[in-house]
Image (cartoon, rainbow, N blue to C red):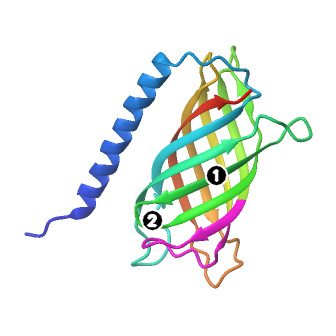
Amino acid sequence: MKFNFAILERLEVQIIMLKFLTFLIFFITFNQVQAKDNNNRLSVGLGIFNYMEDGSPPHNDQSGMINLELHSGRKMFNLIKPFAGFLGTNENAYYAYGGFGIDGYYGKKKNFVVTPSLACGYYKDGKEIKAGNPLEFYIGIDMFYRFKNNARIGVGIFHISNADSGKKNPGSETLVLKYQIPIGR
């Protein structure tokens, strides 16, 4: 009888995400930070890298990931907000990037936020997907619920690709649970 370690790894990722969610609920409940929505924001996320299992075997596996981003509160052209980020996987892939996003506010209290974003950056291959080029582009969308203290919780989905600038272009989709807190000012 052969043991399937992939099930164990996915269970470990789910346990980590459950712990992270518990921490977020505790932090949101007791956080008394009051801020305007034009402050800088720190974003922390956990998710699944390459969740659609793109690439060619043996480099098409999913992996757990952590995502850190710093979003500027300053707008360019009264619309676009710059950000910088980093993601790392448990299979030693890393991606450092910078780009721009646009916050769209919805709902009666404008507490639902949808943020499409574009970025580019440096990607280092890990044990999973081989990107084909260190220069990778990022396109994604985040959907958040914004609390009264302007902290946000939500999900993001983004695609990383070299836009056919390398020998191959497998691309990768990432699904991430994010928590953002206002910082500064």
In magenta stretch: residue 96: no
Whole-number angstrom distance, CA of label 2 to CA of label 1: 23 Å
Instruction: Give the residues in magenta.
Output: 120-136
- Mark 1 nearby-residue class (10 Å; few <14, some 14–19, many ≥20): some
- Work out whether 97 lies above or below 82: below
In this image, 162 relative to 15: left or right? right
Which residue is drawn at the image coordinates 61% and 81% (left, top)?
Answer: 168
Q: Residue 142: image x %, image y %?
A: 62, 41
Amino acid under label 2? Glu
| Residue lying at the far right of the rendered structure | 77
Please name whichever residue, 51 or 152, is drawn nearer the observer in this view of the structure: 152
- Work out whether 71 lies above or below 34: below
| Residue lying at the far left of the rendered structure | 1
Please name whichever residue, 153 or 58, is drawn nearer the observer in this view of the structure: 153
- Work out whether 9 lies above or below 93: above
Which residue is drawn at the image coordinates 7% and 69% (left, top)?
Answer: 1
Which residue is drawn at the image coordinates 46% and 54% (left, top)?
Answer: 65
Q: Residue 174: image x %, image y %?
A: 53, 55
Identify residue for label 1. 85
- Work out whether 118 lies above or below 31: below
What mark, if any, has residue 53 been given in the picture? 2
Q: Residue 94: image x %, image y %?
A: 54, 64
Quadrant holding the C terminus: top right
Q: Residue 74: image x %, image y %?
A: 82, 36
Local SS, label 2: loop
Q: Earlier in the sequence, mark 2 or mark 1?
A: 2
Amino acid under label 1? Gly
Which residue is drawn at the image coordinates 73% and 25% (left, top)?
Answer: 37
